[in-house]
Structure formats: C-alpha cells, structure tokens
Image (cartoon, grey):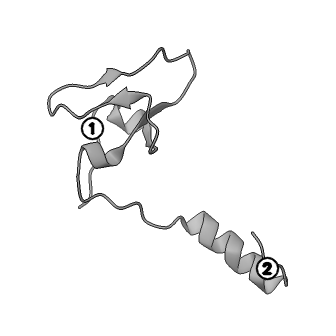
Amino acid sequence: MLVIEIDNGRFMNHTTEPNTDFTRVVEGYATRDIAPGEELLCNYSEFDPEFALLPSLVAAFAAQKAMTNGHAGG
C-alpha cells in the first residue's frame, strides 16, 4: 500500500512511542503536551494494522560502507 498525504498528516513521522493517538478512525489527538517545534509522532500501525516499516536505505548503506571499510559495527 502506498499512502499519499494531501493534508497536514504529511508532517507527521512514525514511531512506536507516539505523542499522538489515531486509534479512532475519524480523529486524532495529542497524548501529552507537545512543545512548539517538537515533531508530531504517530504509530503508522494505527492506520494500517498490517503496517511493516521497510528497512532504512540509509542504515543499509552505512552498514555496507562499514563492512567495506573493514568495520564490524555500524
């Protein structure tokens, strides 16, 4: 599934410890005070129960580069 946001949802980022709650289909709310400038965080699995975060291409590139340079860690 590909989701294209056409509203302010495009400013939210995924985490398993969100500061918002979107478990209700038609509304969301903050779970605590959110400071000015703080990221809005939601758990994408609240929108799609089958959501699975794809591996980060940045993390994969860093791991590959570390292996190429002879480092075991990232």
* Position of residue 28 in the picture relative to residue 15 (left or right): left
Vertical position of residue 45 compared to residue 22: above or below: below
**Residue found 18% across the figure and 31% down from its top:** 24
Side (left or right) of 9 relative to 12: left
Q: Position of residue 49 (x, y in %)?
A: 23, 53
Question: Where does label 1 land, which residue?
Answer: 6
At 78% from the left edge and 85% from the top edge, which residue is drawn? 68
Q: What SS does tag 1 mark?
A: loop
Tell which residue pokes out farthest to the left in this image: 26
Q: Residue furthest right?
A: 70
The residue that mark 2 highlights is: 72
Q: CA distance from mark 2 to mark 1?
A: 42 Å
Q: Position of residue 19 (x, y in %)?
A: 44, 28
- 60 vs 26, left or right, is right
Question: Considering only vertical position in the picture, is 56 above or below 41?
Answer: below
- Please determine whether, in this image, residue 2 is positioned above or below residue 30: below
Image-quadrant location for residue 25: top left
Q: Quadrant of residue 8?
A: top left
For image coordinates 85% across by 84% down, the residue present is 70
Report the amino acid beneath label 2: Ala
The amino acid sitting under disc 1 is Ile
Mark closer to the observer (2, 1): 2
Q: Give the number of the disc on residue 27.
A: none
Q: Quadrant of the C terminus?
A: bottom right
Residue 31 position in % (x across, y down): 39, 22
